[in-house]
Amino acid sequence: KQWYQRRVAITVGIATIRRQLDVDVMISGHTHKLEAYEKDGKFYINPGSVTGAYSALERDPVPAFILMDIQSNTLVTYVYSLANDEMEVKKIEFKKSVPEREE
């Protein structure tokens, strides 16, 4: 239960900071837990730990890192993780919605 409460507090805190900064992409760390997801039209990234270092929030940490390619209003994230001695690569694309201009 404590683990879950701590995780929720961190997630809420990161979302609060993202709103205060008024950014479309929020990159954070500290938990060593790999995450890359879109929520409410914003993109959240935690690159995890390249060494798979211990994390109080993750029982079985997975070595991981992220590469990003930013072009105009599109962010392509390549998520590299090591699972069962095999490198997995996932591609996640986030496109910032740009309001249309009124003429």
Image (cartoon, grey):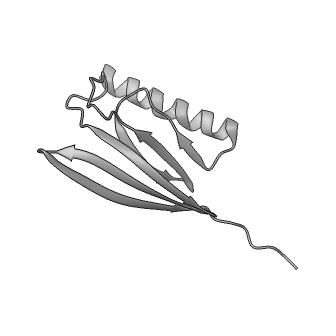
The N terminus - image quarter: top left
Residue occupying the point 54% across, 30% down: 13
Residue drawn at point x = 35 percent, y = 42 percent: 65
Report the residue at 61% width, 61% height from top.
96
Query: How far from the left and from the top, in percent, is residue 99?
Result: 73, 68
Question: Where is residue 102 drawn, in percent x and y?
Answer: 84, 76
Q: How many marks?
A: 0
Q: Residue at x 53, y 34 (%)?
A: 14
Query: Which residue sits furthest bottom?
Result: 103
Q: Quadrant of residue 29?
A: top left
Q: Residue 83 at x, y = what percent?
A: 17, 45
50 or 62: which is nearer to us? 50
Residue furthest right as drawn: 103
Picture layout, residue 11 above or below residue 83 = above
Residue 15 in the image, given as x and y percentages of width and height: 56, 38
Point out the image quarter for the C terminus.
bottom right
Is 43 on the left-hand or right-hand side of 57? right
Residue extending furthest left? 84
Closest to the observer, 9 or 17: 17
